[in-house]
Amino acid sequence: MFSSLSASAAWLPSECCFLHPRPGWSIGVAVAYGDGMSEHPSAPLSAATATATLLLAVTAYVYGLGTQHAMTNGDEALYAHIARKTAESGAWLPLRCDIPVMVDTKPPFIFWQAILSTDRGQRWSLFDLRWPSLVWTGLTALLVARVALVVGAGRSGSLLAAAVYLAFLGIFRYGRPFLTNPPEIFWTFLPCWLLLEWSPKSFHSRFVFPTVVGGCLGMALLAKSFVILAPTGLVLAAWHAHVRGWRLVPFLREALPGLVWTAIVALGVFALWPLLDPEPEVIWRQFVVGENVGKLQAGAPNYIVALLWVRRSIWGLFAGWFLHAGLLAFPVAGTMLRGWQFRHSASQGERLLWLVCIGTFLFYCIPTQRSGRYLLDAMPAVAILVALHWHRLLRSAFATTCVAALVIISGVALLSIALAQRFSDVTIGPLHWAILAGGGLVSLLPIAKPRWLETLALPSVFATYLALSGLAVVLDPPEGGFDAAGIEAARGRVVWVPEDFYAAAERERMLLPGAIVRGYPQSDAGPDPAQVGPDDLLLIRQSLDQPVPKGALGRRLCMGSRFSTVQYRTMFMDGLVDNLFRLDWLVPASHAGSVER
C-alpha cells in the first residue's frame, strides 16, 4: 500500500522541505479571458463577500434543523433509539437496544453525546439530538479555514474554503443529522491542522505531537470504528515520508516510532469502551466481527469482480467524490484537472492535502463494501483544494452550479404551489415564498451576468438548501403532524408503526408524545396478531387518492422516502404530488384488515 501511495504521488518533489506558503497567494474571482479562466488571482474575493456567504451557509444549516424531513440517513433513527434506551437504563454502559443484533454496532461516543444533549431523554426531539452535530461541523469548518490560511490561501481564501466545505451536499446531508460522521470528520482532520500549524517541529516530534495526534484519533475511533486508524495512519505515514523526500531510512528512523506510538495511544483510547463495558463479548461479536470484519466479505463471485464491476466497485467509490460535492461536482472535477496541470508549482501544503485524498481513496478500495460515505473524512481537504484553485476554474463549472440550483429551486416552487392547491389546510408562510424568490434571483443573476458566476455560485447552493429545508418545514407540525385529537387518542396506548429500516418508528415517538410506539417490518402484512392488544392503534400509510380508513382517529401529511426505481418513474409520469406525498392514518388495530382478531 505504501508503494502504491508513493507511485500515485510520484509527481511530488523529492527534496525534504516543510511548509513555506507562497507570498502573495490569494484566492480571486476569475477574470474573463478567452476560455473564461484566469491564470492568476488578480481580483481577490473580498472578505466581505466571503463573510456574507458564510453567514448564509450558517443560516442554511440552522434552518429546519429539527425537521422530520431533513436530508439524513436511516441510521439516525436507530442511533436515536439506542441513545434513548441507554438513557432509560440509567447507566452509560452497556448500550441498550430493543433490537438485540444492533446493540453494539457503533462505539458509545455519539450515544453519550445524545444522552447529554437531550438531558437523558427528557427533551426528546430531533433538534436536541442534532444540534451537537451542527457544532462538530462548524468546528470542522473553522479548521478548514485555518488550514487553508496555513497552506497559503490568504484570508479571503480561507473563508472561501470553509464556505466550500459547508456547500458540499455530503456535508449538508451527513453533517447536520444525528450521525457518527460530524465528530468523526472533526477528530480525523484535527491532526492535519496540528501537523501543518506547527510544522516543521510537529514532523520531528518523537513524543508530544504523536501523543496528541493519537488522542485525537482515539476520539475518532470512539465516534466511528477502530478501522479509521488504518486510512488516517496511511495518510500520516505518507505525510512524514513526503517531507523526508520519500527516503526510507530517514522515515524508519525518525517517523516510524512516533507513528507507532500514535497508533498505540489511539487504540488505548478506543480500548476504554470494551474495558469499561460489562458485556465485552457482545462488542466482539457485533462490532468487531459483524460490523467491521464482515465488510471484507465478497459481495460478488470473487474479489476482482467486486473490485471492478459491481455497484460498489472502485468506480462507484470514485464517483463518491462528485456525489458528495453535489452542486459543486463540476468545480471539484475542475480542481482535479487544475491540480494535475499545475502540480509542478503546487505548494508543500497543497501536496500534503492531495495525499489526504489519495490515501483515503486507496485504502477504501480494499474492502468489498466500498461506500462513498467513507470519503467524507477527506472532504475538508477537498474543500481547501477547491479554494486554492478557485481562480483557475472555468466559468462553465460555476455555471453548472447556478443552473442546477435554479432548476431545483424552481422545482421546489412548483411543488409548493401544487401542495398548497391540493391541501387547503396546509399553510405555506411568506418566509418560504421569500426564500424561493431570493434563491431564484441569486441563481438566475449569474446566468444573466456571467461576471457574477464565481461570486454567486456558493450562495446559490445555500439558497437551494434553504428552499429544500423550507419545504420540509411546511410538513412539520402542525400541518405535517397529527392533530390534537389524534395525539390525545394515542396517549397511553400502543401504536404499531411499519418500519422500512431498523427502529424507524422512533420518529413517530416524537410525533406522538405519551404513546407507546412499537415497530414491525413494513414487509409484513401487519404486526403479530398475538401481540396486539384490544386497545392498540395501528398506523396505516396510504397514497393521497385512497379513501379514509375505517375508524380513523387522526392523520398526518408527510413525504415518502426510500423510493424504488419504478416508484421514481411513476412519480414523474403520473404526478409528483400524488406519488411523493402520503397520508399516515391512526386507526384502531381491530379495524385494520391486516390484523386478524
Image: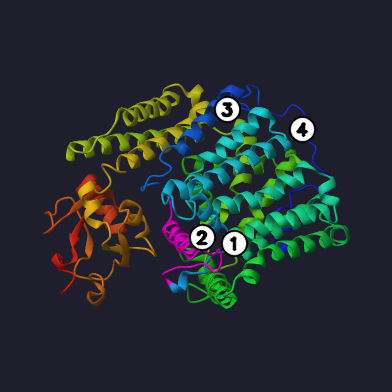
Question: Mark on residue 22?
Answer: 4
Horizontal side of 90 relative to 391 (left or right) equals left
Q: Decide: marks 4, 3 in contact (CB < 8 A)? A: no
Secondary structure at numbered mark 4? loop
**Amino acid under disc 3:** Ala
Question: Which one is earlier in the sequence, the residue at label 1 or at label 2?
Answer: 1
Question: Which one is earlier in the sequence, the residue at label 4 or at label 2?
Answer: 4
Q: Decide: marks 1, 2 in contact (CB < 8 A)? A: yes
Give the mark toward the camera: 4 or 2: 2
Give the mark toward the camera: 4 or 3: 3
Residue pictured at 59% horizontal, 75% vertical: 280
Q: CA distance from mark 1 to mark 4?
A: 33 Å
The segment highlighted magenta reads 72-99
Mark 2 neighbour class, 10 Å CA radius: few under 14, some 14 to 19, many 20 or more? some
Quarter assignment of residue 337: top right
Give the mark toward the camera: 3 or 2: 3
Question: Which one is earlier in the sequence, the residue at label 1 or at label 3?
Answer: 3
Question: Mark on residue 50?
Answer: 3
Q: CA distance from mark 1 to mark 3?
A: 34 Å
Q: CA distance from mark 3 to mark 2?
A: 33 Å
Q: CA distance from mark 4 to mark 3?
A: 21 Å
Q: Is residue 21 above or below residue 253?
A: above
Horizontal side of 11 relative to 128 (left or right) equals right
**Amino acid under disc 4:** Arg
Question: Mark on residue 364?
Answer: 1
**Amino acid under disc 1:** Tyr
Q: Decide: marks 4, 2 in contact (CB < 8 A)? A: no
Question: Which one is earlier in the sequence, the residue at label 3 or at label 2?
Answer: 3
Question: Mark on residue 371?
Answer: 2
Quick check: is 581 in the magenta stretch?
no
